[in-house]
Structure formats: structure tokens, C-alpha cells
Image (cartoon, helix red, strand yellow):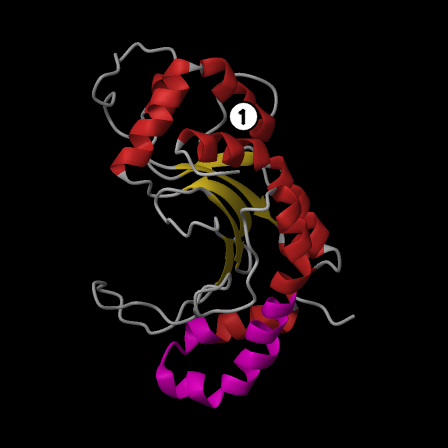
């Protein structure tokens, strides 16, 4: 079986970072198709049944036009960085509702030395964050169960570090307690979160391994209780 993620893909991404311009990309378009786009479409197609096993409301769509593969082209309209291409690859498994900022999802980032699997809600909108905080406040034990299923043990999960094999929180938090919650609330550190996303780093060897499809699915399964809790909190089906 042809591998999905190869050292040739890593080499392509490194070369793209060194030559991030349209002339170079056009000269290497066939290489992009051969080591990036088509193998990652196969990855998405083959992991599809495992994603459906996490929840029937999450889809794996082998496309970079409204599908699971992020487009390689950067949106530079509002950025000071005008380089036209992303120097990493990423795959997302979105909720069938397609409500970014409301429904949580699963994510796989591919970049030499910086690959990771993530899950949760990134940049949630105001109503979604309010609903999550209300659910956490109303039933902290259910929140603890979902959180600790991902991070292991009990108590607060680490915000950083912890080694490659551990999950960690990503994203930002408020400086002060959100409106309506006391600064000494027992769940204040989690209530202050603006992003409810768990990440687990992956080594290059893990990403390049022949069993990367079941391995990524296994890591997403670890995060399933968090995604389920978030989905229920924001009132989307899981």
C-alpha cells in the first residue's frame, strides 16, 4: 500500500517554506499533487469509517474545496504576511452542521517537527461560549469527567508541556473572570477559556508510520468525551 505521509511531503513543505512564491509553486505543481494533495485525499477517505465511528455527525470528505483538507493557499487579504502558501498541511473533520465557531470538531496538523492531533472548539462565538460556561457551572462533575477522560487522572489539565505523549490545552483565556462568575469560582480557570481545544503532539516517526490512520483515529477517540460534552453544551447533535 502506498504511504499517506512521506519524507517527500516533508521535503516539499520545507522547500515551499524556502521558496514561498507563485513561480516556484507552479513549477512544482505536479510534485504538490503527487506527495501532498492526492495522498492526503486517500488518508481522508481511508480514515472516514473510523471518523464515522466516533460520531455519525462528523464527516471525512476527500476534497480541499469545502472538504476535510485545508487549502494550501493562504488568505492574505488582512495579513501583513503576504506569502501565498501555507507551509503545513491540515485536515479537519467538521460537524455535519458546518457551524464553525459553534460546533466542536477534530483536527490533524502535519508539519515536520510540529505535527499534532487536536479536538474541541476553536474561536467559539459568544453564544457558544456562554452555553459552555453555563453547562460547566450547572454540572461540574460532567465537565470533569469529559475533561479528565482526555487529560487523564483528575484535577486541572496542563496548559503546556507534559511531553509528546500527553494532551495539553491550546488557545487563549480571559485575563479576568467572565461576566456573571466570581473570581473564586471552583471552575474559574476553565470558565475563563476562550478556546476549548485539546492538542497532542505527534513525532515525525508517528506521522510517517504505516499505521498513521488507526493511530490518529485512536488519538481522536481519546478526545471523543470532550467533543461530545462540548457538542451537547452548544446543542448540536452528537
Residue 110: say if magenta. Answer: no
Number of numbered tags placed on the structure image = 1
Q: Main secondary structure of the magenta part?
A: helix
User: Vertical placement of 75 versus 171: above or below?
Assistant: below
Residue 206 rendering spot, x and y as whole percentages: 68, 53
Range shown magenta: 16-42
Residue 138: image quadrant is: top left
Q: Could one spot residue 220 in this view of the protein?
A: yes
**Badge 1: few (under 14), some or many (20 or more) residues near its Cα, within 10 Å?**
many
Q: Quadrant of the N terminus?
A: bottom right
Residue 233 rendering spot, x and y as whole percentages: 42, 29
Residue 236 rendering spot, x and y as whole percentages: 44, 38
Q: Which residue is mark 1?
A: 146
Q: Could one spot residue 173 in this view of the protein?
A: no
Q: Is residue 208 left or right of residue 179?
A: right
User: Vertical placement of 215 versus 44: above or below?
Assistant: above
Residue 128: image quadrant is: top left
Front-most of 206 and 216? 216
Front-most of 164 and 96? 96
User: Vertical placement of 181 versus 163: above or below?
Assistant: above
Q: Is residue 78 left or right of residue 113?
A: left
The residue shown at (38%, 76%) is 20
The residue shown at (66%, 45%) is 53
- Specify the farthest residue to the right: 1
The residue shown at (36%, 42%) is 102
The residue shown at (52%, 60%) is 111
Front-most of 194 and 237? 237
Residue 185 rendering spot, x and y as whole percentages: 33, 11
Callout 1 secondary element? helix
Amino acid at each position: 500500500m502506498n504511504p499517506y505521509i512521506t519524507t517527500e511531503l516533508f521535503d516539499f513543505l520545507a522547500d515551499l517554506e524556502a521558496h514561498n512564491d507563485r513561480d516556484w509553486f507552479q513549477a512544482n505543481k505536479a510534485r504538490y499533487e503527487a506527495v501532498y494533495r492526492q495522498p492526503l485525499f486517500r488518508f481522508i477517505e481511508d480514515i472516514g469509517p473510523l471518523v464515522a465511528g466516533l460520531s455519525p455527525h462528523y464527516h471525512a470528505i476527500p476534497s480541499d474545496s469545502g472538504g476535510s483538507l485545508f487549502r494550501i493557499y493562504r488568505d492574505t487579504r488582512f495579513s501583513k504576511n503576504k506569502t501565498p502558501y501555507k507551509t503545513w498541511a491540515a485536515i479537519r473533520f467538521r460537524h455535519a452542521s458546518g457551524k464553525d465557531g459553534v460546533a466542536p470538531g477534530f483536527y490533524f496538523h502535519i508539519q515536520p517537527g510540529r505535527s499534532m492531533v487536536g479536538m474541541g472548539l476553536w474561536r467559539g462565538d459568544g453564544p457558544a461560549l456562554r452555553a459552555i460556561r453555563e453547562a460547566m457551572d450547572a454540572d461540574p462533575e460532567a465537565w470533569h469527567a469529559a475533561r479528565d477522560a482526555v487529560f487523564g487522572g483528575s484535577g486541572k489539565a496542563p496548559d503546556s508541556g507534559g511531553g509528546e505523549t500527553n494532551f495539553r490545552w491550546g488557545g487563549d483565556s480571559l485575563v479576568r473572570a467572565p461576566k456573571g462568575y466570581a473570581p473564586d469560582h471552583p471552575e474559574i480557570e476553565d470558565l475563563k477559556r476562550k478556546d476549548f481545544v485539546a492538542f497532542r503532539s505527534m513525532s515525525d516517526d508517528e506521522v510517517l508510520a504505516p499505521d498513521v490512520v488507526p493511530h490518529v483515529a485512536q488519538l481522536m477517540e481519546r478526545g471523543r468525551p470532550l467533543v461530545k460534552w462540548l457538542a451537547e453544551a452548544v446543542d448540536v447533535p452528537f
